[in-house]
Image (cartoon, rainbow, N blue to C red):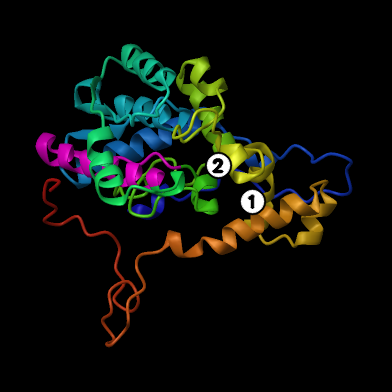
């Protein structure tokens, strides 16, 4: 059954020399088709196969989580979508305002849980000196702890919000924001998520604002990554489809950007896998003992 969700939304483009990177047909999205597909995917995976009525979403105020909230509402009904805003003390006020816009438009339930006491109980009481990168990872894992606990309380399934660009770059916290068991955006590049957001009617202020992890005032994803999502996506789609560095550069991309993107993918490969197991038998799980997701006897979230 899972195979019916696997389809291609573009074709590779092989260009010739250009002064500027060319537009990519491979990244163009039939947004209406993808919308229908993902709505069907969520309804089938959550309600039909798992027998769970609702979805839990960490609603950050950013475009990715907004898109997931829109999709889940369409797939499951607004009464079955539970959104949680989980700010830390350094989170911007606008993030909460943007999350509120989504909730107002969709009519879904939203609760705000401040994770500052939870995070600071560890960061300030036990660690003292700690850099922002570590604080960010603690925040991501605390948020996921809350979402999974609310999942058990409400009998709803946590739904992931990470896009393909972030996953390729390893721009997420391992066992944090990548932890939900289902992710409708995981095979969509960031620029494709934005196109889908417009199809769904996500408020334009959310689509237009600079993507940010919202840990430090003024921080942005693209500053952290060292490249814009627009350029990154166009390099990624070429690289993942087998083009060489030279071929990508010939399409108008700088050698520095190509190197940066490919290095980030290569350096974070471990984050896209389950833990490495010391294999001692021919039934090592996910090494030799392979089987598709088994929905028989699925229990409610715990």
Q: Main secondary structure of the magenta part?
A: helix
Instruction: Name the one closer to the observer, 83 or 142.
Output: 142
Q: Residues within 10 Å of mark 2 (few under 14, many from 20)?
A: many
The reply to whether residue 223 is visible in this rendering is yes
Report helix, strand or loop for mark 1.
helix
Q: Position of residue 111 (x, y in %)?
A: 22, 23
Q: Which residue is pictured at 55% across the width and 38% down the height?
A: 221
Q: Look at mark 1 in the image and give the residue it sits on.
A: 236
Which quadrant holds residue 232? Answer: top right
Locate residue 109, reporting x and y percent.
22, 20
Left or right, 94 with respect to 145, comes to right
Question: Which residues lie in the magenta part?
Answer: 135-162
Q: Position of residue 88 (x, y in %)?
A: 33, 31
Q: Secondary structure at mark 2?
A: loop
**Residue placed at 66% from the left, 47% from the top?**
11
Indicate whether residue 153 is drawn in magenta.
yes
Indicate which disc residue 189 carries. Answer: 2
Residue at point 65% right, 44% down? Answer: 226
Structural crowding at the residue carrying mark 1, measured as other residues with C-alpha within 10 Å and reported as few (<14), some (14–19) or many (≥20): many
Task: Describe residue 278's horizontal placement relative to residue 251 as left or right.
Answer: left
Label whose residue precedes the other's in the sequence (1 or 2): 2
Q: Quadrant of residue 10?
A: top right
Vertical order, 217 against 180 (above or below): above
> Relative to the observer, which residue lies in front, 236 or 298?
236
Residue 171: x and y in percent read 49, 48
162 in relation to 66, above or below:
below
């Amino acid at each position: 059954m899972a195979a019916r969700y696997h389809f291609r939304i573009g074709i590779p483009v092989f260009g010739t020399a250009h002064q500027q990177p060319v537009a990519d047909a491979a990244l163009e999205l039939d947004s209406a088709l993808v919308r229908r597909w993902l709505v069907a995917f969520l309804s089938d995976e959550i309600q039909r196969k798992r027998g769970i009525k609702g979805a839990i979403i960490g609603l950050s105020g950013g475009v990715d989580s907004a898109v997931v909230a829109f999709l889940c509402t369409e797939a499951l009904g607004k009464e079955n979508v539970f959104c949680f805003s989980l700010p830390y003390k350094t989170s911007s006020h606008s993030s909460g305002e943007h999350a509120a816009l989504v909730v107002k438009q969709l009519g879904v339930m939203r609760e705000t849980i401040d994770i500052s006491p939870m995070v600071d109980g560890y960061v300030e009481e036990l660690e003292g000196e700690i850099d922002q990168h570590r604080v960010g990872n603690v925040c991501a894992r605390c948020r996921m702890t809350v979402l999974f606990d609310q999942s058990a309380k409400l009998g709803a399934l946590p739904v992931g919000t990470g896009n393909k660009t972030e996953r390729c770059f390893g721009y997420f916290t391992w066992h944090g924001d990548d932890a939900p068991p289902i992710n409708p955006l995981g095979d969509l590049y960031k620029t494709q998520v934005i196109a889908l957001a417009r199809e769904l009617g996500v408020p334009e202020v959310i689509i237009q604002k600079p993507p940010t992890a919202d840990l430090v005032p003024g921080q942005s994803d693209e500053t952290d990554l060292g490249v814009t999502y627009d350029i990154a996506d166009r390099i990624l789609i070429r690289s993942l489809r087998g083009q060489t560095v030279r071929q990508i550069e010939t399409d108008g991309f700088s050698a520095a950007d190509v190197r940066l993107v490919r290095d980030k993918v290569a350096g974070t490969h471990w984050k896209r896998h389950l833990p490495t197991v010391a294999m001692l038998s021919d039934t090592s799980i996910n090494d030799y003992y392979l089987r598709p997701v088994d929905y028989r006897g699925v229990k409610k979230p715990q």
